[in-house]
Amino acid sequence: MKSIQQEVISFLKQYYQSSEAETMTFWLLEKLYQVSQTDILMNKKVAESENLIKQKNEYLEKLKYYEPIQYVLGECYFCNRKFEVNASVLIPRPETEELVNYIYEQHQDNTPQKILDVGTGSGCIAISLALNFPSANVTAIDISEKALETAQKNAHNLKARVDFIRTDVLKWQPEDMWDIIVSNPPYIKEDEKNSMRKNVLDYEPHLALFVENNSPLVFYKAIAQIAQKSLNDNGFLYFEINEALGQETVAELEKMYFINIELIKDFYGKNRFVKAQYKSSKFMSK
């Protein structure tokens, strides 16, 4: 195993920084040989075969062109659970794990009965919340049929009870009501593309990433408008946001009469989440 590990690391270091190459090597070997990191470190003996060598070379060829390893392997971990991912869905980020964990911490003593996830992608938020709150009814929407197919597979594999709906949030007029509405919508402005890594730009779905420069909060406004009509009294709205648009997002929610608005930093100290509460009497009194 040690020789295979060194071979893969040496190859990947031609294209990636050492620490990234080492991490990717662990993931690749774990998937390919069905071993753990401990097995690799302990130099466990594994049987090579033509098929394994062929698969390994195919993986490395894709990584050579900076295809994200999560897409190469077809999976990633989110909140300690394995999710299927492909080019139709955004790769779940650690920051989004923070959001899910924060929601759980805020509501574990008062379980929400109904939760809506807007722009579900792989389903990572909706599924994680459904598993964290087993008694809750969770609904997830997305405009992409392929993304919903992936999310449904993940829900099935993880035995999570989630209702999936294909719809365009900019046109949607739901009749249901929820205690929590959560979303990680597209929030990267077109003019920020130049600062992004090649593997994100070339492979991840732009539909899930980018918004026009002149309307970067378009999805936040639409979701907040839905929340005004579809959040139960004292319900909560949670957003993952563009770090550069925190104050603007808060200002929009203030204009729409949300209360108890909080701008929350991620583990890097960046403005990354917004929490707001809704009370219908506050809106009606304006």
Image (tube, grey):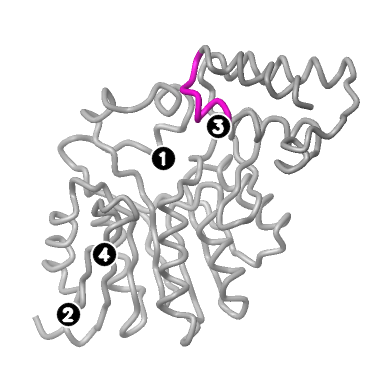
Amino acid at dot 1: Ala
Does 17 appear in magenta?
A: yes
Foreground mark, 1 or 2, reads 1
Tag of residue 87:
3
The residue wearing badge 2 is 283
Tag of residue 208:
1
* Left or right of 215 in this view: 166: right
Magenta stretch: helix, strand or loop mostly: helix
Binning the other alpha carbons within 10 Å of mark 4 as few (below 14), some (14 to 19) or many (20 upward) gives some
Q: Earlier in the sequence, mark 4 or mark 2?
A: 4
Secondary structure found at label 4: helix
Foreground mark, 2 or 3, reads 3
Query: In the rendering, at what x and y percent does residue 259 appear?
Result: 19, 77
Secondary structure found at label 3: loop
* Left or right of 161 in this view: 262: left
Give the tally of numbered discs: 4
Which image quarter holds the N terminus?
A: top right
Magenta part of the protein: which range?
15-22
The residue wearing badge 4 is 225
Query: Which residue is the extreme one toward the front?
Result: 42
Tell me, yes or no, whether the two marked residues, 1 and 2, touch with CB atoms within 8 Å: no
